[in-house]
């Protein structure tokens, strides 16, 4: 009886470890900033940070939201903080001329930034390349203000939103809300199915 209880506890611990490992890989590691206090604390961090400045009314922002979260779960970037800032909920919008804007910060200083998205299909590769170039190199230095200004003046033709559209109708708002809720439910279902498969595979290997 004691041996069975010990074995049962051991299996429980192993399953909990597997579940924790799975959840840490599947769930996005994105900090959502919805106020000035959170934003100010984020800007004070010294570790490498990728910040996506976005808004709920920006279609491109919504389109890259999931890919941005997926990149945040990659083990290569486990030491990088990923953050999404809602520009409508912060008072300091200096330097933000359009959304989405992606800022790369190290030691509390802006190293680089990109405005808009060149290709939705190639967004994740573009994001990875920018992170590797600006935050994975210990010798990455802050760009001088005149260089940053020149980059803004020579901004490439990307998908970017600069003006806030008219408020959507109540019907459109409800439809958008339902779509987001459905997407969230599907994410949870897929995560549960993947977890069940992982547990079943582990059980098979344990008893084989």
Image (cartoon, rainbow, N blue to C red):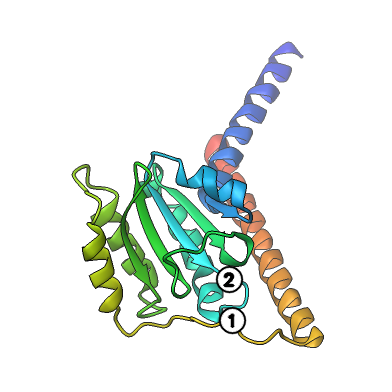
The front one of 36 and 48 is: 36
Relative depth, front residue between 48 and 27: 48
Q: Are marks 2 and 1 in contact (CB under 8 Å)?
A: yes
Question: In this orientation, which residue lies closer to the viewer: 78 or 2?
Answer: 78
Q: Is residue 200 in view from this perspective?
A: no
Picture residue at 61% right of the left edge, 45% below the top: 199
State the SS at label 2.
Answer: loop
Residue at numbered disc 2: 55
Residue 22, position in %: x, y?
A: 55, 45
SS type, badge 1? loop
Vertical side of 116 occupied by 190: above or below:
above
- The dot on residue 164 is 1
Image location (x, y in percent) of residue 5: 73, 18
- Which mark is on residue 43? none
- Distance from disc 2 to disc 1, alpha carbons, whole Å, reads 9 Å
Q: At 44% across and 80% down in the image, what residue appears?
A: 160
């Amino acid at each position: 009886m004691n041996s069975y209880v010990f074995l049962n506890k051991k299996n429980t611990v192993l399953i909990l470890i597997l579940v924790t490992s799975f959840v840490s890989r599947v769930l996005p590691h994105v900090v959502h900033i919805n106020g000035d206090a959170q934003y100010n604390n984020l800007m004070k961090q010294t570790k490498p940070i990728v910040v996506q400045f976005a808004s709920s009314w920006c279609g491109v922002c919504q389109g890259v939201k999931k890919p941005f979260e997926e990149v945040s779960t990659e083990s290569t970037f486990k030491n990088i903080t990923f953050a999404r800032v809602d520009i409508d909920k912060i008072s300091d919008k200096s330097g933000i001329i359009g959304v989405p804007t992606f800022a790369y910060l190290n030691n509390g200083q802006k190293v680089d930034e990109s405005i808009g998205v060149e290709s939705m299909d190639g967004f994740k590769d573009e994001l990875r390349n920018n992170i590797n170039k600006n935050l994975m190199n210990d010798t990455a230095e802050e760009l001088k203000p005149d260089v940053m200004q020149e980059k803004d003046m020579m901004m490439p033709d990307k998908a970017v939103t600069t003006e806030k559209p008219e408020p959507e109708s109540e019907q459109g708002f409800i439809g958008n809300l339902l779509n987001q809720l459905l997407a969230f439910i599907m994410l949870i279902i897929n995560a549960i199915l993947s977890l069940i498969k992982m547990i079943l595979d582990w059980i098979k290997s344990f008893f084989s």
